[in-house]
Amino acid sequence: MKIYTKTGDGGESALVGGQRVRKSHDRLAAYGTVDELNAALGVARAEIARGSSAPVGLDALLAEIQNRLFDLGAELASPDPVAKKTALLEEADVDRLEAAIDSHEEQLPALRQFILPGGTPTAAALHLARTICRRAERLIVVLNDREPIRETALVYVNRLGDLLFVLARAANHAAGEADVPWMKK
C-alpha cells in the first residue's frame, strides 16, 4: 500500500466510517492536535533514551499515554465511535493519570511561584507536550460544542495536561535541576 492516496488533494479527509469532511473541520483539528501531542511525547521519550535524567518509570508511563492518545485520536476521528467499536478511554485511564500525578507530586518541593517551561531537555519536551495538550483540550471543547464528545475523553485530556506539568517538574528534580522561576518585572 502506498503512503499517498491522493484522496486528500482537494482539501478533504475521510473520518472513520468513510464520511468525507474538509481538512479545516473541528474534528480533524482536534485529532490532529492529539497526534501532534503524541509526537511531542515521542520527543520526550527520545530524550530519555539518549540518557537524559528522568524519574524512574517515566518512559513506560509515556509509552502507555502514547497508546491511549492513539485510542483518543481514533475516537475523535469517528462520528460514532461506539458503533464503529473504536477503543475508548475509560475512567480507569483517568484514574491512572491521577495516581501518577499524586505519586510524582509528593516527591516534589512545593511550588511557591510561577515557573517557566524549561530546565533539562526532557523537562522542556514535557512542557512543550503540556502546551500542545492544552491546545488539544481547547479544540476538543470546540468540537464538543458542535458534536458531543464523551466526557471521559474531555476529562482525560484535562488531567493529562496536569500530569505533564508535574512530570516536567519531576524530570528537572530527577536531574537535580531547579525549575526555572518566572522573574516578575
Image (cartoon, rainbow, N blue to C red):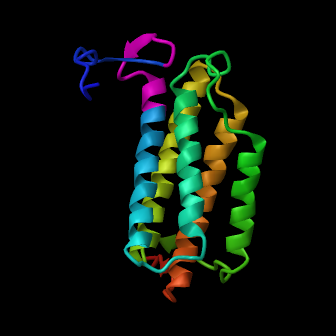
Query: Quick one: quadrant of the N terminus?
Result: top left
Does 178 sit above or below residue 115?
below
Residue ranking furthest to the bottom: 176
Q: Nearer the viewer, residue 79 or 45?
A: 45
Q: Give the x, y percent position of residue 81.
A: 62, 22
Query: Quick one: quadrant of the C terminus?
Result: bottom left
Q: Nearer the viewer, residue 63 or 127?
A: 63
Q: Give the x, y percent position of residue 27.
A: 48, 25
Which residue is drawn at the image coordinates 51% and 49% (left, top)? 133
Q: Is residue 28 magenta?
A: yes
Which residue is drawn at the image coordinates 52% and 34% (left, top)? 73
Q: Is residue 11 magenta?
A: no
Does 2 sit above or below residue 176?
above
Which residue is drawn at the image coordinates 61% and 18% (left, top)? 84
Q: How many marks?
A: 0
Does 100 sit above or below residue 178?
above
* Res. 142 visible in picture: no
Quadrant assignment, res 23:
top left
Magenta residues (range): 16-30
Q: Nearer the viewer, residue 107 or 7?
A: 7
* Res. 166 visible in picture: yes
Quadrant assignment, res 35:
top left
Quadrant assignment, res 125:
bottom left
Q: Nearer the viewer, residue 126 or 65?
A: 65
In this image, 4 relative to 156: left or right? left
Q: Give the x, y percent position of residue 121.
A: 39, 73
In this image, 130 relative to 162: left or right? left
Q: Give the x, y percent position of residue 150.
A: 69, 29
